[in-house]
Amino acid sequence: MTDYFNAFEMSPVPDGPDAVAPDPFLGIYAMPMFVKIPTRDLHASTDFWVRGLGFVDLFSVPGQIVHLRRWAFQDVLLVPADDDAAPSAASTVQVFVSCVIGQLDSVADACRELSPDSVTGPYDTAWRTRDIAVVTPEGARVTFTAATPFIPDSDVARDFASVGIFAPEASEGGAQ
């Protein structure tokens, strides 16, 4: 891991236990990555993504495409599906969306309000996140993932250090 370096300053994801989520990013940029999701019902899918998952409708071409966004670089394109192309059950592909820990409950509540059985979690992972998994109306599995506080002398920190991943303040001598 010695070729890697701390580049948190270029991430739109806020850091720290008291991190506040940024407002949706409304600027136009060349998207470095996006997800394209076919749906049989653009209106229903857009409503769920906006009211449940907290995305904004950046722009739409009626009947052709809906460009959704949350933070910078969290872009989703909803497009009409061919009748044979739309999955009838949750897809095996998962999309992970960064959020701050304070957003998990409100996103889960909003999604459950729209579709009671759509949310799993929250649950903690071995890599220091708390997640909720949401199945959207078109069958996409979207996981909202938030960093939990980093504890330098924890088992997680030691596990990370054992594979060459050190806390930004730590040296290669160990996690501090």
Image (tube, rainbow, N blue to C red):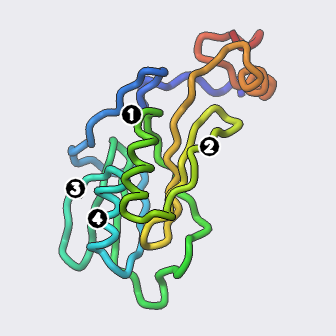
Q: If you read the primary sequence from the N terminus, does the residue marked by circle 3 or circle 1 appear first? A: 1
Q: Which residue is mark 3?
A: 58
Circle nearer the N terminus (1, 4):
1
Alpha carbon separation for disc pair 3 and 1: 18 Å
Pinpoint residue 150: horizontal percent, then vertical percent.
61, 20
Q: Residue at x 68, y 20 (%)?
A: 166
Report the front residue among 10 and 97: 97
Type of amino acid under label 2: Tyr
Cα distance between the residues tagged 3 and 2: 30 Å
Between tags 1 and 4, which lies in front?
4
Q: Which residue lies under the disc numbered 4?
A: 47
Residue count near mark 3 (Cα–Cα under 10 Å), binned few <14, some 14–19, many ≥20: some
The amino acid pointed to by label 3 is: Leu
Measured Cα–Cα span from mark 2 to mark 1: 23 Å
Residue 60: give its label.
Answer: none
Nearest to N terminus: mark 3 or mark 2: 3
Q: Residues within 10 Å of mark 2 (few under 14, many from 20)?
A: few
79 in relation to 56, above or below: below
Residue 6, image quadrant: top right
Q: Which residue is mark 1?
A: 12
Disc 3 and disc 1 in contact, CB within 8 angstroms: no
Residue at the spot of label 2: 123
Left or right: 105 with respect to 66? Answer: right
Q: Nearer the viewer, residue 4 or 114?
A: 114
Of callouts 4 and 3, the N-terminal one? 4
Foreground: 168 or 157?
A: 157
